[in-house]
Amino acid sequence: MEERIQTLMQEVSAYTATDKAGVENFRLAYVSKKGAVSELFEGMKQLPPEEKKKVGKLLNDLKQAAEAKLAVLNEQLESHTAATFDLDLTLPPVPNTTGNAHPLTLVRNRIIEIFERLGFNVADGPEIESDWYNFSALNFPENHPAREMQDTFFVEKNPDVLLRTHTSNVQIRLLEKQKPPVRAIMPGRVYRNEAISARAHCFFHQVEGLYVNRNVGFADLKQTLYHFAKEMFHKDIQIRFRPSFFPFTEPSAEIDISCLICNGKGCNVCKHSGWVEIAGAGMVHPNVLRNCGVDPEEFTGFAFGMGIERITMLKYRVNDLRLYSENDLRFLRQFQSVI
Ligand code: PHE
């Protein structure tokens, strides 16, 4: 019996098959219930007990070898079939067809990441707004030009329902609900009735920031925005604050960074000034705090607002705003490797 097992062992290891039938023959001959191995197991019952142990082990080895061989034969058959029918290993790989985040999403996420590490929460507000939240509560005088038709889209000719022209409406909504300290950033889409060109669009995106607490000063605003610009662009970037005006902040400033295209030497992008504007900012006007039920004697705060399109333009040297909303895959795919 031992000899028979050995012979079978050799047969099993030497067996080759080139087609399905060959593999099936192997299975029938060695692995199936009616095959040679099962037959030997049957025969083992008649052996005297002292031999049973030894032969049993050999037989088990044979059984395992036959099963392993069957698996190998099946595998070979499969790869052989694939190779002969539809697999050409010399072809370049199938291109990666997964999508990627839109550049504005990438930059928005990066802005959120930078401010979250400074302790800012993300807040949200409606895009269809009332005059109160978009203008009046923000200390816009009744006759301010920004309320006029050329800037604002009104919903169904109702002067009280409009598409928000900035994300500052969320400042008001947040301060109404939450007692200071409030430290939040508010990304979102805004709308302005402007002719579409390379530098202007009727909708775009902003990120508003607000920090209200006891003893918040202009130095806090400056350091926060310095930190942001260095994180967003690079650590050697130059930053300057220019005096400006917004109804809802006093004092107000516009923030410029040294032009990334020409490194401050002067070019078309910075109109040969060496500087480009990235944000508006200032200390929250006491009237705004009062409108939200916050006592300006006890609390002060700063606010800032920046355009995501502008930051993206500077960071990735995009020279036409319209590219962001045209869905041209040749443009969008360039951001595939950016995380
Ligand atoms: N809301 C302003 C704008 O849209 C930006 C801004 C926000 C300025 C907060 C100061 C403070 O231009």
Image (cartoon, rainbow, N blue to C red):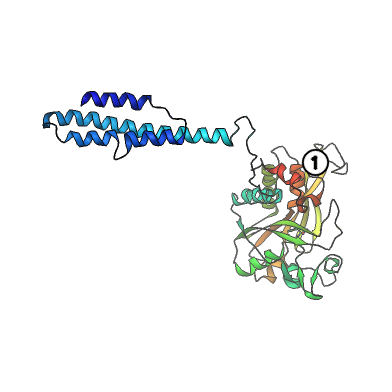
Quarter of the N terminus within the rendering? top left
Depth order, front residue of 209/246: 209
Q: Is 5 positioned to the left or the right of 251 in the image? A: left
Q: Position of residue 46 (x, y in %)?
A: 14, 34
Q: Decide if residue 84 is in sight here.
A: yes
Q: Tell me where residue 249 appears, x and y as whole percent.
A: 75, 61
Inspect the image, locate mark 1, and give the three-letter code of the amino acid beneath it: Cys
Foreground of the two, 188 or 208 = 188
Look at the image and tell me in which quarter the C terminus lies.
top right
Rendered position, 48 above or below 232: above
For mark 1, does the 10 Å Cα neighbourhood hold few (<14), some (14 to 19), or many (20 or more) residues?
Answer: many
Q: Quadrant of residue 189?
A: bottom right
In the displayed structure, 317 sits above or below 158; it is above
Q: Position of residue 296 (x, y in %)?
A: 67, 66
Residue found at x 82% / y 38% = 264
Seen in the picture, residue 3 relative to 34 is either above or below; the reply is: above
Q: Nearer the viewer, residue 51 or 170?
A: 51
Q: Which residue is mark 1?
A: 259
Residue at 72% from the left image edge and 42% from the top image edge: 334
Q: Does residue 107 lie above or below 128 as drawn? A: above
Image quadrant of ligand 1 equals: bottom right
- Asked if the residue at label 1 sits under 8 Å from ligand 1, the reply is no
In front here: 297 or 202?
202
- Image quarter of residue 265: top right
Residue 283, x across and y down, in percent:
72, 58
Local secondary structure at mark 1 = loop
Tally of numbered discs: 1
Would residue 137 be visible to someone looking at this image? no
